[in-house]
Image (spheres, grey):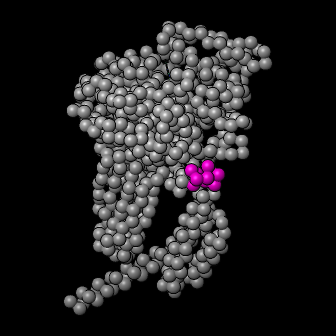
Amino acid sequence: MATIVGIDLGTTNSLVAYMDGDRPRVIPGKEGRTMVPSIVGFLDNGLVVGDPAREHLVRSPSRTIYSVKRFMGKSVADVAGELSYFPYVLREKGGVIRIQMGDKTYSPPQVSAMILKELKRRAEAHLGEELTRAVVTVPAYFNDSQRQATKDAGLIAGLDVLRILNEPTAASLAYGLQRNARGIIAVYDLGGGTFDISILKLKDGIFEVLATNGNTHLGGDDFDRRMMDAVIRDVRDRHGINVDDDPELMQTIRLEAEQTKRRLSDEPQARMTIPLPEGRGAYERTWSRDEFETLTADLVEQTMAPCRLALKDAGLETGQVDEVVLVGGSTRMPCIRDRVQALFGKTPHCDLNPDEVVALGAAVQAGILAGDNTDMLLLDVTPLSLGIETMGGVMSVVIRRNTTIPASAREMFTTSADGQTSVDIHILQGERELVTDNRSLARFQLKVPPLPAGTPRIEVTFLIDANGILNVTASDIRTGRSQSVQVKSSHGLTDEEVEHMIRDSFRFAEQDVRARQLIEARIEAEAIITATEKALRRGENLIERDEAQAVRHAMDALRAANAGEDHRAIRSKITDVEHITHHLAEVLMDATLKDALENKKLSEVRE
Ligand code: AMP
């Protein structure tokens, strides 16, 4: 059977591992290093990934992409606060971030796919076989769009992603396999860009994730930035150089700060030297570990609240945790080890290489999928609650956060207005009460026969598969009519777009999306035109002549836009028609209600 590899697609570094007999192993590159820096350089003579790209961070910062994982499944608005730290230009197209490189733009899944391809190449060279299947890890806190974006990246790279695995779950697999631990385990994972805490239960070879929490915007990069900010201020004060105007110098400082931080994990003091431009000498400074720890103490402290919350969700006290596992390069910092030990009152485990644990665990999961290790079952949880919008803009939860997946749940809903002919199913993710505070995942409509409010019975079923991908079905119990949707991220790529990209090497992807958006807008416009014509026929003599005229004008404008190629123009005219027919719809509803009441009276008289 062909090998399935396990891939840790990290913010800073990525790794690929496989099962060598019953032992997971990380695959090294030619030069023996196991980590591939998650960096892609777009050079004039081609693309470079990993270590060769790292050099270009300084030489051509605006053509070198790093930390792309931070942008997976996100919009520009989501990352607005961080933009000044990135030397490359981000644009937004159709809700998806695009990274500008010369006259081309790339989506985060496309860039991640370049890193995955490099890992695939490395593994194929090492194993001497073609690889097409993989398990890829993501932070436990990744939402649906980020998971989907990761799957898309795999597809673009020619890898069938059999399973998206939470990073802390992977780490627990790596440890569980080697030590057969039982009891409650806290996995504390501080990587380059994300922080995750997971509370796991290990028993008889079964891993159950009891709770997860974390912060997708906290990691080693933030520690680097603290040091960078201090250096940038110093360089300005001492040398009169504005680093903001010099992307090359900014990158040199970033790399040097990161190296100095690493040295401080082993030594009480570290000296940094940064050459300044135009022969202005060098900036030098000696950092003490104490000084660095004071500067970053609040970052360490920020990891504590998620730990306490996860414990609370799991219904546990700190004293009930049997073992603590450290994952991620940043857990090499002594201040992290000390703080984690103080919180849980236990010496944390760090016997596996914290940079490799996740990839090793992904390989173990790949082994389970390949049937190598069938006596091990893996349970996972959904990190955020999922539900739908109900009356008054409130979210009604269907599947609670921390529910073990795969999972399914169903709820009954009904209509809120008399004569309603369709129900809007708006799928949401989050923990807040109000719809506006949660994340909108998808919307669709279910047609229902016009009946008095509260009469139809609509069953909504949520099904989450093992990858955390959600399928929602709404059925009208009375008519048996049903409608379903696989929840795709609003920011991610569509299946069609991904397939198209694979076929045409990224060339026509955008045209494809635009075409689909146009088709969808046209279908909706046709439906609105038909419905409005019908409403006008029924209600024309119930409204003023001017109003009917205005409705006709709006419909003409929609027809004209519909003949064009611009989906945004069509959408805008659809909104106009909806707006202008609001009153007509109300009038018709009143009339229907009146008829219904009169019929009722008549039947009462007859009785
Ligand atoms: P990961 O995403 O797990 O590879 O973590 C990478 C992060 O760990 C980066 O922010 C690194 O700077 C950081 N890191 C790696 N080694 C050390 C070290 N010895 N001391 C402090 N931070 C480190």
- Residue at screen point 58% across, 53% down: 503
The front one of 1 and 382 is: 1
Residue 322 as seen in the image, left or right of residue 29: left
Q: Which quadrant holds residue 97?
A: top right
Whether 168 is drawn above or below 523: the answer is: above
Image x and y of residue 521, in percent = 56, 66
Image x and y of residue 556, in percent = 63, 76
Q: Which quadrant holds residue 87?
A: top right
- Residue at screen point 67% across, 42% down: 100
The front one of 182 and 567 is: 182
The C terminus - image quarter = bottom left
Instruction: Please name the predominant secondary structure of the magenta segment in the image.
Output: helix
Whether 307 is drawn above or below 590: the answer is: above
- Residue at screen point 73% across, 36% down: 44
Image x and y of residue 48, in percent = 64, 33
**Across the whole image, how many numbered discs are drawn on residues?**
0
Looking at the image, which residue sits at the far bottom? 606
Image x and y of residue 108, in percent = 57, 42
The front one of 489 and 530 is: 489
Q: Is residue 503 magenta?
A: yes
- Residue at screen point 34% across, 54% down: 463
The front one of 334 and 378 is: 378
* Residue 93 appears in the picture as rendered: no
Q: Is residue 459 magenta?
A: no
* Residue 494 appears in the picture as rendered: yes
Whether 351 is drawn above or below 125: the answer is: above
Q: Which residues are magenta?
A: 500-509
The N terminus - image quarter = top left
